Image (cartoon, rainbow, N blue to C red):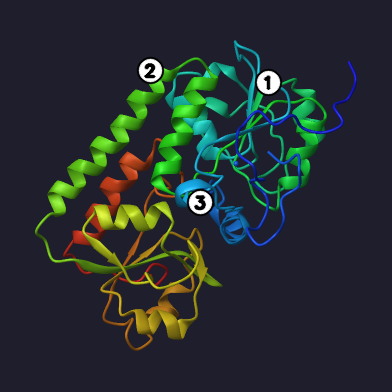
Amino acid sequence: MGVLPTPVLLSSATSSPFHNHRRTPKAWLPMPRADPIAKFRTLRSGLRLAASLLAMVPIRDGASALDAPIYLGPKPPANVRRVVTLAPSLSETVIALGAADRLVGVSRFDEFPQVSKLPRVGGFLDPSVEAVLALKPDLVLVQPSPGNRQPVEKMAQLGTPILALRMQSVAEILGGVREVGRALGLSDRAESVAQSIERSRAAIRARSAGDKKVRVLFVYGLEPLVVAGPGSFADELMRDAGAVNAAQNVSSPYQTYSAESAIRSRPEVVIVAADDSSGAEKLSRLPGLNQARWVKLQSKDLLHPGPSLSRGLEELFDLIHSTSLQHPPGSR
């Protein structure tokens, strides 16, 4: 077989998932929270990079070329049996669809017991083209980022089917779950998973209805300080849980924040999702932050844009509405 000179675009979208919206897309161009996320401190930088540079080329009716998943490379086979994932959230999605046995390779960040013995093919930002091709996948699932653009496009050029899924908002996550289901011939199961997430959101909204809105600052990282902004699924889920995002005026879903900005945000609750929370105690002593209730996210369910969001939303609600006094993470 000859090498494909360029990826074959199977989507009707007209822009690349890897381009900044201010750039001119290539003619052939064909889509993460973080995670994204086992070793979150490492992946955090990838999430910030992806959030700031992901393509957003406007198309009809104010929509975006990234509103739907995008295929690169040749068409996947009708019966997809060998799947490689480049982010833990995508592995989790395949597992939730009952197709863990189809996974043949995952990222080095994956910690799920179902994939503990599978080959690692690199990280979210630095997947190994050679390692992926050696596994002869029928389909590679990827969350697009400028950091992984080159290796992912190379895989497509070399004849590997790619399904790129932007998983930044809740709508994109649900769309991604459904598209993976279609690709694997498991649409009914995918619809069930998506509807389960929606039911969880509706139940949490009902529980928080009528309650006083709580100002919450959701912290992904402390050094530097990175918070959840509008456009992130964490922002949407905070609203579901009866919160107001204290960082609602920032310009990025994963925003680098100054201590001064954090003080001005006047949070009532600070949720720390960082693996390393050693900087929380110092930050919590600052005026305007020393009266907030500081809590530590106990699981990674809110860091994986996938089926675990239902569990993560329950935890988020409990953290926001708990009245127990808690010390800043890292203070003990």
Q: Position of residue 94 (x, y in %)?
A: 50, 26
Q: How many marks?
A: 3
Question: Is label 2 or label 3 in front?
Answer: 2
State the separation of the CA atoms marked 2 and 3: 26 Å
Identified at 31% across, 40% down, the residue is 310
Q: Is residue 315 left or right of residue 258?
A: left
Quarter-wise, where is residue 260 in the image? bottom left
Q: Residue at x 61, y 14 (%)?
A: 81
SS type, badge 1: loop
Sequence order check, earlier mark of 1 and 3: 3
Image: 305 above or below 116: below
Residue furthest out toward the top: 79
Tag 2, which secondary structure? Answer: helix
Amino acid bearing label 3: Arg
Residue highlighted by disc 1? 75
Asked if marks 1 and 2 touch (Cβ < 8 Å), the reply is no
Tag 2 residue: 188
- Residue 116, by quadrant, is top right
Instruction: Report which residue position mark 3 lands on.
Output: 33
Residue 316 relative to residue 203: left or right: right
Residue depicted at x 50% and y 46%: 60
